[in-house]
Amino acid sequence: MSNVILFNLTTFLFGVASALYLGALYAKNEKISAVGTWVCVLAAVVSTAALGVRWYESYQMGIGRIPVTNLYESLVFFAWSVNLFYLIVERKYRNRTFGAFVMPIAFFTMVFAVYNDSSIQPLVPALQSYWLHAHVITCFVGYAAFAVSAGVAVMYLLKARQENAKISEGVVGLLPACKMLDDLVYRAIIWGFPFLTAGIITGAAWANYAWGTYWSWDPKETWSLIVWLVYAAFLHARVTRGWHGRRAAILSIVGFLATIMCYLGVNLVLSGLHSYGGG
Amino acid sequence: MADEKRTPSPMDRVWDFFISVKLAIVTLIVLASTSIIGTIIEQNQPSEKYHQIYEDWAFALMDRINLFDMYHSTWFLLMLVLFTVNLSCCTIDRFPKMLKVVRNPRTKLDGSLEKSLSLLDRWKRKGTLSEWAGKYTEALSGSFAKPKVTEDGGEVHLYAETGVASRFGVYVTHLSIIIIFIGAIVGNVAGFKGYVNIPEGEAVTQVPVRGGIRIQDLGFTVRCNAFSLETYPSGQPKAYKSDLSVIDGGREVLRKTIVVNDPLQYKGIWFYQSSYGQAGGATAQVAVTRKDGTPMGALALTANEPVPIDGYGIVRGVNYEQNFQGKGPALQVVVEKPGQPAASFWLVQARPDLDRQRADSLVFSFGGLNSKMFTGLQVAKDPGVNIVWLGCSLMVIGLIMAFFLSHQRVWVRLAQGTDGRVEVVLAGSASRNRLAFEKRFEKLQTGVKATGQ
């Protein structure tokens, strides 16, 4: 189907963008990463079109529904969100080195998606709800923000080691200053946190409307709470106890690992209510 | 005073313990890490299942510390209580201080405040204090916020602020958590959750709750008129539908077809479509005619139940197939006539005349299987749920206030300089997102400086 072809093209473009950003770092060439930005913009257009086409095709099959309801669709939607969130960050911070650390996340997500069933399946009764839209979109904006934060946290750790050693050469030398990276780690989280909160709340509201319980300690719910608690700890440590730099960066990476567990691990390893279990 | 140097009393120490953010961070991390356990060990399973997985001693130990229902265990609830107490104490300790600061802002840019601010500019102007105070008041009102003007010891101070609400964000968020917990407690104490199966055509007035330990009276009757299952062409389920009626005071007061994600509510009690199944055995409809075509009537056969026909013999339905030899639904029938061996044959629904081949005195034709279904309903009453939603809404509002608003303050001090000119100091600070405020301050600085030039 044409949507899958467009998604495959997106995967390719994400790969090219990642390679360009990494190449630009090694070659210390700004022009290469500028091309990377245009590839990202193109990928954003293609993947948005792919989501639209998939949505349209589902209507043609007589089972019209938003394309975010199984593992394949959720992976491509996650990659789409990461790419978009990244473009906003790049534009706002006017620095292209982030791309080398964030775009590979989008690329590998798409590669993983390609190995999953990409057919359009009808919705089981439990998923037929308007809450689906609000729940999935809020969760994934949150996840994307956390992905960007973790990518930047890795940059921070690399850069900080070099700044401590008082050298500024090599690939790492091109990275933005520690202060800016540290700020961005935090800034991405304060975007992600309210969205994750809204995602958990819309999930609870939906569960209450479908089953009469807003919280049942299902593994997915519990892991979303774990993620929420980790970032809540991050924010308290940062704002009131002045956790900056290394410790904040590590906590951001821990938070993102918990996010991956919540998003994928629960479905692939544990059992529960969410639809894309087992792929 | 001597009192202040005294070592803190035990009460003070307890208080200091509960108001520390360190405790909050530790509690958050401990809650997060212990919560993992219950996602790895499947919760609330029958104990035989655990016995298959764990050694006896491990099972005994895990059962003792409630690992099989850990989220409702005393130790986990105690952690939630500690979390709430910590949250409340922090609020009680800090909220009045914050309120005091907000109510009585430092409206005068004195020396010590000036030293603590990094965004600062100074210049001189010819003219009088009041003239420039008037001009700058207007400039600030236009581009920032209307300033408060104070005169003190020959100096004029202007103070303007925006985004004070940002200071309240954290308290709104913390309060929201307490409200959610209150809602959850109200729901647990005053509500119930149950599950009931209602066969088609039947009604219930009570539901078993808490896994059947207790019976809850509904105070009215709910009847299932019909249940139906719709499938997609591929055979996957599309919709489970229950046609329900509520009967109160002897008459039907409400009728609704519910599906998953569209429940029925009456007097605060909600009915959710949850499962379905076959109620009792199915009945096969079999039409009987004489060889000459005269109709004899219809039989309703239940599995293996013998039905006698006067002057003929005994008929039993023994088997049913959804797709018999590719011909669709079919019923296997056994006929026993007195003094003859039993005869067994299949009746295919799609071919009602097939039985004529048997050349018997009676011809049977299969009219289909009538299976009575039951609908499985989740039944819940939760008077706390709206309190929970109130808390959730407040949480989102609180987070937005805390993260996306910034308490921005701007001071202007005007003093008569020794050279006869007016000395102006402009300063600013923001409670968060200082980078963005720096840009705003620069603009403001240019604007204010250009005023009256």
Image (cartoon, helix red, strand yellow):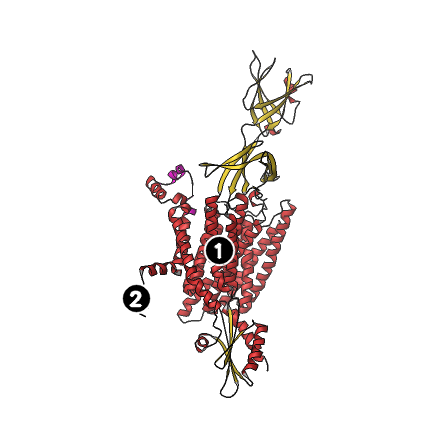
| Residue B50 is covered by the magenta coloring | yes
SS for callout 1: helix
Mark 2 vs 1: CB contact within 8 A:
no
- Left/right placement of residue A166 relative to residue B333 reads left
SS for callout 2: loop
| Residue A250 is covered by the magenta coloring | no
Q: Please tell me in which quadrant of the rendered image residue B3 appears.
A: bottom left
- Left/right placement of residue B193 relative to residue B232 reads left
Q: Position of residue B55 (x, y in %)?
A: 34, 40
Q: Please tell me in which quadrant of the rendered image residue A253 appears.
A: bottom left
Specify the quadrant that holds the C terminus of chain B: bottom right
Choose the circle earlier in sequence order: 2 or 1: 2
What residue sits right under mark 1 in the picture?
Answer: B176
Residue A109 in view in this figure: no
The crowd level at tag 1 (other Cα within 10 Å; few <14, some 14-19, many 20+) is: many
What residue sits right under mark 2 in the picture?
Answer: B6
- A9 over B272 or under it: above or below: below
- B19 over A2 or under it: above or below: below
Q: Are marks 2 and 1 on the same chain?
A: yes
Residue A236 in view in this figure: yes
Q: Position of residue B188 (x, y in %)?
A: 46, 45
- A179 over B174 or under it: above or below: below
Say which mark, if any, is on residue A13: none
The front one of B198 and B370 is B198
Residue at 36% in and 45% down: B65
Q: Position of residue A32 (x, y in %)?
A: 55, 66
Residue at the far bottom: name it: B419
* Magenta highlight range: B38-54
> Which amino acid does the dot numbered 2 rest on?
Arg
> Which amino acid does the dot numbered 1 rest on?
Ser
Chain letter of the residue beneath label 1 in the structure image: B
